[in-house]
Image: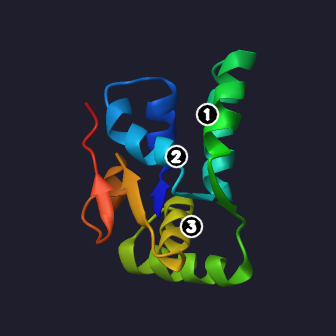
Amino acid sequence: MIVVDSSGWIEYLLDEANAGEFAPAIESRELVIPTICVYEVQRFFLSRTSDPELFKKLREAMSGGVVVPLQASLAMEAANLSKAHRLPMADSIILATARHHGAAVWTQDTHFAELPDVKFFPKH
């Protein structure tokens, strides 16, 4: 299983330089999707466009995985990971969700770069 960080979803949906790096994970449908990623990606695009085709593409892409809500146990684990690794809130929730599901995190976010079970793609 794979968790694609919000930065990867945005890169893929905008067809940016690293889109091809994230395509195998997103298109594999072997995804665990933390609800915080749904929020961050939706919020990113709401602040930049009102293009209904882009939002349709977003819904279709994110429907290919298991969306995991933030439960109290995940929130507590995220707080522990945030403290241990000095991660921002969203990143710690993403990491806690991935670990809970035995998934790797695919990202271009430097907060994750040195963590185990992370596939990091430097941003071009």
Q: Between 66 and 112, which is closer to the camera in this rendering? A: 66
* Residue for point 47% across, 51% down: 4
* Residue for point 49% across, 58% down: 3
Residue 28: give its label: none
Q: In this view, does 48 lie to the left or right of 92?
A: right
- Asked if labels 2 and 3 touch by Cβ distance under 8 angstroms, the answer is no
Q: Between 2 and 72, which is closer to the camera in this rendering? A: 2
* Residue for point 51% across, 56% down: 30
Question: Gap between marks 3 and 1, in whole Å?
Answer: 18 Å
Q: Where is residue 52 in the image (x, y as percent from the top left)?
A: 75, 18
Going from the N terminus, do you reach mark 3 or mark 2 first? Answer: 2
Question: Gap between marks 1 and 2, in whole Å?
Answer: 9 Å
Q: Position of residue 31 (x, y in %)?
A: 54, 56
Give the residue at mark 2.
Answer: 6
Res. 17 image quadrant = top left
- Asked if labels 2 and 1 touch by Cβ distance under 8 angstroms, the answer is yes
Asked whether the viewer can see residue 122, the reply is yes
Judged from the image, the secondary structure of the residue bearing numbered disc 3 is helix
Please tell me whether residue 89 is drawn above or below residue 116 in the rendered image: above
Give the residue at mark 1.
Answer: 44
Judged from the image, the secondary structure of the residue bearing numbered disc 1 is helix
Three-letter amino acid code of the residue under disc 3: Ile
Asked whether the viewer can see residue 50, the reply is no
Question: Gap between marks 3 and 2, in whole Å?
Answer: 12 Å
The 10 Å Cα crowd at callout 2, few under 14, some 14 to 19, many 20 or more, is: many
Q: Is residue 112 left or right of residue 96?
A: left
Q: Where is residue 87 in the image (x, y as percent from the top left)?
A: 44, 66
Going from the N terminus, do you reach mark 3 or mark 1 first? Answer: 1
Three-letter amino acid code of the residue under disc 2: Ser
- Asked if labels 1 and 3 touch by Cβ distance under 8 angstroms, the answer is no
Give the residue at mark 3.
Answer: 93
